[in-house]
Image (cartoon, helix red, strand yellow):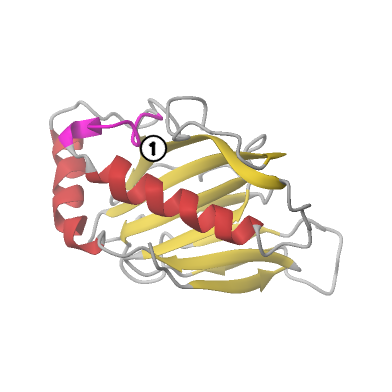
Amino acid sequence: MKMQITEHPLFNLPIYQVTLPGFSQYHDEIVELFEGLIRSGQLKAHENGYGYQTRTDLLLPGAYGKRYFHELLASGFTVACKGILERTRVELPTNQAWVNTLTVGWANVQTREQFEEESPWHDHLPATLSGCYYVSTATGDEGNLQFLNPLMDNIFMPPSIEFTPQPGDLIIFPSFFRHRPGRCPNTRRTRVSLCMDSYWTIRGAGVEASDGRGTGDG
């Protein structure tokens, strides 16, 4: 799977903007899927996390009756993560390689919110890399992906930075980087991000790994 990976430094930490071939054709269908789950009451606010968030079963084969979450989204995310890890400063001996041990995913849906509170700042440890694929974004400047300055007492940097994603963007970042989605009190579009955590380890070359996709805490 060929994809373009663009690095953006925030507070001297890298985040990566990735293209995911073949997935954009399902955007409208995915928005309709999760809007329908909200209308039917199957997806309730704050049941699994802030806002309308699903369980961490998105990447299982056939989840929600859609194989593309497993076959395209999960596969593309793990390929991108491996490419990112291989470009870090860690130089592995020829007999070792990065191996994916687990990848989990869930959907985060934001509508025209009447919630008073904001999503809390959080990280995704002990995962290695985390990602958000943007199926649709909110209108205006709402719902941006916000990152918290890890050095809050640094007067030469802002306390946080917002990254403005576009539909089709897969944003990948170190799982320890604290972040949150911006609120969407006035949006005229449903914001759907597909969120993922990927766990990696270094093992001897030739060691077989599982497909790395399953359930777990996200």
Q: Which residue is mark 1?
A: 106
Please give the name of the residue rendered at 40% of the width and 54% of the height, measured from the top-left corner. 76
Residue count near mark 1 (Cα–Cα under 10 Å), binned few <14, some 14–19, many ≥20: many
Instruction: List x then y, in percent, for residue 4.
Output: 45, 73
Is residue 7 positioned above or below 1 on the image?
Answer: below
Q: Is residue 178 left or right of residue 56?
A: right
Specify the segment rendered in magenta: 56-65
Instruction: List x then y, in percent, for residue 94.
Output: 74, 53
Please give the name of the residue rendered at 39% of the width and 48% of the height, measured from the top-left corner. 75
Instruction: List x then y, in percent, for residue 115.
Output: 40, 42
Q: Is residue 65 left or right of residue 209?
A: left
Is residue 206 positioned above or below 93 on the image?
Answer: above
Instruction: List x then y, in percent, for residue 130.
Output: 55, 48
- Numbered label tally: 1
Is residue 189 positioned above or below 196 on the image?
Answer: below
Q: Is residue 113 left or right of residue 173?
A: left
- Magenta stretch, main secondary structure class: loop
Residue 200 in sight:
yes
Quadrant containing the N terminus in the rendered view? bottom left
- The amino acid type, in three-letter code, at marker 1 is Trp
Residue 123 in sight:
no
Q: Is residue 176 left or right of residue 130?
A: right
Q: Please tell me whether residue 7 belongs to the stretch shown in magenta.
A: no
Asked where in the image residue 2 lies, by quadrant, the reply is bottom left
Please give the name of the residue rendered at 23% of the width and 60% of the height, measured from the top-left corner. 189
Judged from the image, the secondary structure of the residue bearing numbered disc 1 is strand
Asked where in the image residue 138 lies, by quadrant, the reply is bottom left
Which is nearer the eye, 131 or 200?
A: 200
